[in-house]
Amino acid sequence: MPVEWRVTDSLVSYQEAVETMETRAAAIAAGRAAELVWLLEHPPLYTAGTSTNPTDVIDARFPIHESGRGGQLTYHGPGQRVAYVMIDLRRRGPDVRRFVATLEEWIIRTLAAAGVRAERREDRIGVWVRRPGKGEGFEDKIAAIGVRVKQWVTLHGIAINVNPNLSHFSGIVPCGVSEKRYGVTSLSDLGVPVSLTDVDGFLHREFEPLFGLTTAQTVGKTSNEPPRAVSERSVPVPSR
């Protein structure tokens, strides 16, 4: 069964997103629904993973939500493309590390399509770009990863900074990384003039060689509205 590909074109509250993910993941685990990739934006907020250190909150200018995912504190807000990935690892192979590595590769390929060389780091989660103009050894994080697995179905996913307000990250220590040579960046900050729609296209194209066939893209103002198809069904690509 192909993976459903959904885009929501209005801001989605974090509570609504979590409730939707939980409901869909349960249906996937029960064999009642297809796997889902859901692209959206949140209003400004912080989410706290299971490894969060409370001292990493510097200025709680936005709501902080306990997420239940792995990792520490991160920011979500307009201009950041969040992709929630609900995949059945029983069918694809019950290997969480492999799944996370595949998410990293998906991000790296997506950013390459936008003309940005990004890399994974063994000692730091997420995807990073080198910033030699800032000094030797300086790197900035451009995408975050945080997942949870329930009944071998994945929840949460990735967030790519397209054009968010980067000053909003200063209210926390993002993902617990406090060294001055490690910061946060975005495609806009790097001088790459792409839109969320452009990034959505790159994400869709690069997803299929890694995860397999998707349905036609659907768009709706909220996750509870009936979607409307906006593209043709994609060409099948074997998952691996």
Image (tube, rainbow, N blue to C red):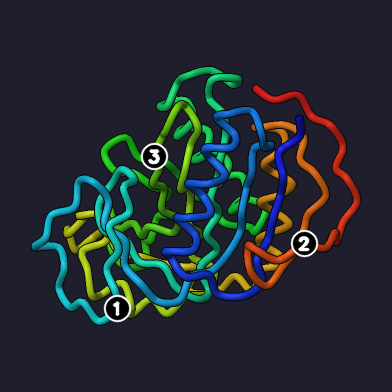
Type of amino acid at the residue the image marks with label 3: Arg
Looking at the picture, tell me which residue is in the foreground, 34 or 123.
34
Quarter of the rendering occupied by the N terminus = top right
Q: Marks 3 and 2, Cα distance to the nearest angstrom?
A: 26 Å
Q: Marks 1 and 3, Cα distance to the nearest angstrom?
A: 23 Å
Task: Give the residue drawn at x 79%, y 29%.
Answer: 237
Say the numbered circle drawn on residue 9: none
Q: Is residue 91 above or below residue 166?
A: above
Residue 195, visible in the rendered structure: no
Q: Earlier in the sequence, mark 1 or mark 3?
A: 1
Type of amino acid at the residue the image marks with label 2: Pro
Quarter of the rendering occupied by the C terminus = top right
Instruction: Examine the image and state in which quarter residue 44 appears.
Output: bottom left
Instruction: Examine the image and state in which quarter residue 87 appears.
Output: top right
Image position, residue 31 (x, y; %): 64, 28
Looking at the picture, tell me which residue is in the foreground, 49 or 113.
49
Residue 89, visible in the rendered structure: yes
Q: Earlier in the sequence, mark 3 or mark 2?
A: 3
Pointer 3: what residue?
148
Q: Badge 2: how crowded within 10 Å, few (<14), some, or many (20+)?
A: some
Image position, residue 224 (x, y; %): 65, 63
Residue at the far right in the pictured view: 232
Task: Give the residue drawn at x 71%, y 49%.
Answer: 5
The reply, left or right, for residue 3 in relation to residue 69 is right
Pointer 2: what residue?
227
Say the numbered circle drawn on residue 62: 1
Which element type, helix, strand or loop, lies under badge 3? strand
Find out whether the residues at labels 3 and 2 contact each other: C-beta distance under 8 Å. Answer: no
Image position, residue 36 (x, y; %): 64, 44
Q: Earlier in the sequence, mark 1 or mark 2?
A: 1
Type of amino acid at the residue the image marks with label 1: Phe
